[in-house]
Amino acid sequence: MRDKKIKLIFFSLRDSKVKDYALDGKKLLFISLLAIVFLVLAVGAGIKYFTGWLDDTKVESLEQANASLMKQLGKIRDNIQEVKHQIRVWEQRDDEMRLMAGLDTLSQDVRMAGVGGPEIAYSEEFDLLPHPIKNEVVETSELIDQLKRQLQLLTESRKAIDEALKNRSDEISHIPTIKPVRRGRLTARFGYRIDPFTGARAKHMGIDLGAPEGTPIFAPADGVVIKVVKTYKPHKSYGRYVVIDHGNGYRTVYGHMHSVKVRMGQKVKRWDVIGTVGQTGRATGPHLHYEVIAYGKKMNPLNYIYE
């Protein structure tokens, strides 16, 4: 059986003539296989090129994403540094307030005590991050953890300050600090003086504040009335007088009163009216004899008038 031949017709561009060629089966098979090989190589090269292009695109996209993430982390770090600076300002103010409250200031070592890097929870996503970004995330987390601890310490310190100031305020409210007769004129000082009744030098254990009879007498601090004497002998002792216990070792005495407006055991506040100026007892005219006793010792009342 003769091999079948396939006639191929070609148009020649050189001489504009139509030429025909006869191919047998073997040549045709060879050409077909060669065409398939070229086709496979071409497809493979195309796939490789496309895959490479995709990889390059993905890498470029990831690089851009990483750069953007680093930029955002950098901004966060800058903001954290600003907050850190503000916290330092608050810590300085905290030191000032602790001194005002009578508390010791906190050293920087104490303020930083217990501050350490937080543990970053492991995750596959975190493990895939580039090393620089991992470091940035860890450092940022450490800063945030540090700020949280510093703020917590500031909160605790503020509570201690508030409590101390409250106690201090209560203490101050029980210390005599005002002149009990507002327009009283100082007529006799604390210490030695010439006794108006004897003419001899004698120690005066308070001050005298001259004022018209009936002038109000104010409590100079919070306290409790522990003594009220309304009966007296003319030209003897304090006449009508009152004693107030202010606590914290302080007591005050008010002599020669015309009238008494308080009773035994009554609690009084600073500026409460406890009576009026008079000249009962050993007095040459209307005035208030005022004494301040601190821890059992009679003190100069002028040292306790902060006006």
Image (cartoon, rainbow, N blue to C red):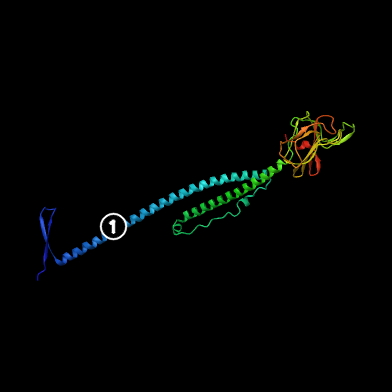
Q: Nearer the viewer, residue 270 or 72?
A: 270
Horizontal side, residue 91 vs residue 263: left or right: left
Q: Position of residue 50 (x, y in %)?
A: 31, 56
> Residue drawn 36% across and 56% down?
55
Name the residue beneath numbered marker 1.
46
Res 100 quadrant in image: top right
Q: Position of residue 28 (x, y in %)?
A: 16, 64
The amino acid pointed to by label 1 is Gly
Horizontal side, residue 245 vs residue 105: left or right: right
Horizontal side, residue 249 vs residue 132: left or right: right
Q: Nearer the viewer, residue 3 or 201?
A: 201
Res 162 quadrant in image: top right
Res 222 quadrant in image: top right
Q: Name the secondary structure under disc 1.
A: helix
Q: Position of residue 271 (x, y in %)?
A: 71, 36
Residue 192 sits above or below residue 56 on the image: above
> Residue drawn 21% across and 61% down?
35
Q: Position of residue 194 (x, y in %)?
A: 87, 32
